[in-house]
Image (cartoon, helix red, strand yellow):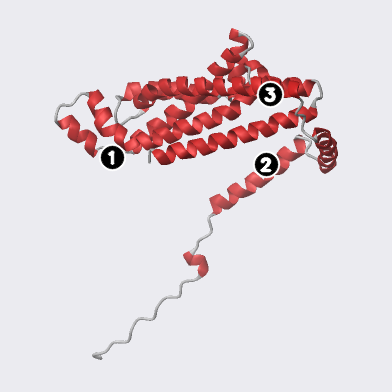
Amino acid sequence: MSEFAPAPTPTRTTRRDAFPPNWPFRIGLLLLALYVVYASSILDLTWPRFLLGLEHGQRFLGRMFPPNVAPDKLKLLYDGMLESLQIAILASVAGTLISLPLGFASARNLSPAPLAWAARLIIVICRTFHPVIVAILFVKAVGFGALAGVLALTVASVGFISKLIGESIEEMSMKPVEALRATGASFLSVVVMAVMPQVLPRFIGFIAYELDSNLRNSALVGIVGGGGIGATLFTAFQRFDYDFVLTIVLTVIVLVMIGEIISGAMRKLFQ
């Protein structure tokens, strides 16, 4: 036998061997494409209708310019925006106060399983419906006005904040928690000394984002009777005051931008 055996010939790997075809993925894409075609055919999504909509939209936008800044209109705008801001702040505060204990209860690494699943069921119920649908229900229950808007946005805030709080707690490190439990610390001490320092910056970010979201949603719930600038916007549409509609829309955009700046500053402050 030779002292130096020849090196084995390397097997050639083809592209098909390195990247085998993913047939379930391809079949899924094909089925999705077929369903898109089917849904488009039964929903009357036609190109002539789209072009007609562009024509109507052009005339609508033409009637919106220039924005209406008459003193009486600005007074309506100020009152509506102030009420929307109050609705958003009240709903955010109430939603946060409810979401903190509910979020802790939903964390499976802190709560027993029955309590965690019960809390998650409440969160799912709060997240099931859009704030507009919830606002319609509260308008039927308590009547038109800001109370219905506050209640609707509070439910939406609970569904959003409590879910993210529970997920943040489940993702944190359990070593500080276990160390405090080994010393015999109470549950409240564990929360204050081991849980809060890890998740407080994210809590602040969630609350700031929800306040920003409630500022936008306050206009939506107002359209269905929940008070705020949405009611003023709906009235302007009914009266065909499209120039005043543009004024309201621009004001809402500015207010949301200001809220985004404030929420960003809050997140940086607590990082």
Which amino acid, mark 1? Ser
Residue that badge 3 annotates: 77
Which of 75/37 is in front?
75
Q: Secondary structure at mark 3?
A: helix
Could you tell me which residue is drawn at 23 percent across and 90 percent down?
3
Which of 253/40 is in front?
253
Disc 1 residue crowd, few under 14, some 14–19, many 20+, Cα 10 Å = few
Residue that badge 2 annotates: 35
Could you tell me which residue is drawn at 77 percent across and 33 percent down?
67
Q: Is residue 58 left or right of residue 10?
A: right
Q: Secondary structure at mark 2?
A: helix
Q: CA distance from mark 1 to mark 3?
A: 48 Å
Q: CA distance from mark 1 to mark 2?
A: 44 Å
Q: Position of residue 200 (x, y in %)?
A: 35, 34
Q: Which of the two discs, 1 and 3, sits closer to the camera?
A: 3
* Residue at the farthest top position: 142
**From the viewer's perspective, is residue 150 above or below residue 213?**
above
Mark 1 or 3, nearer chain start: 3
User: Which numbered tag is attached to residue 89?
Assistant: none
Could you tell me which residue is drawn at 24 percent across and 29 percent down?
190
Q: Position of residue 199 (x, y in %)?
A: 35, 35
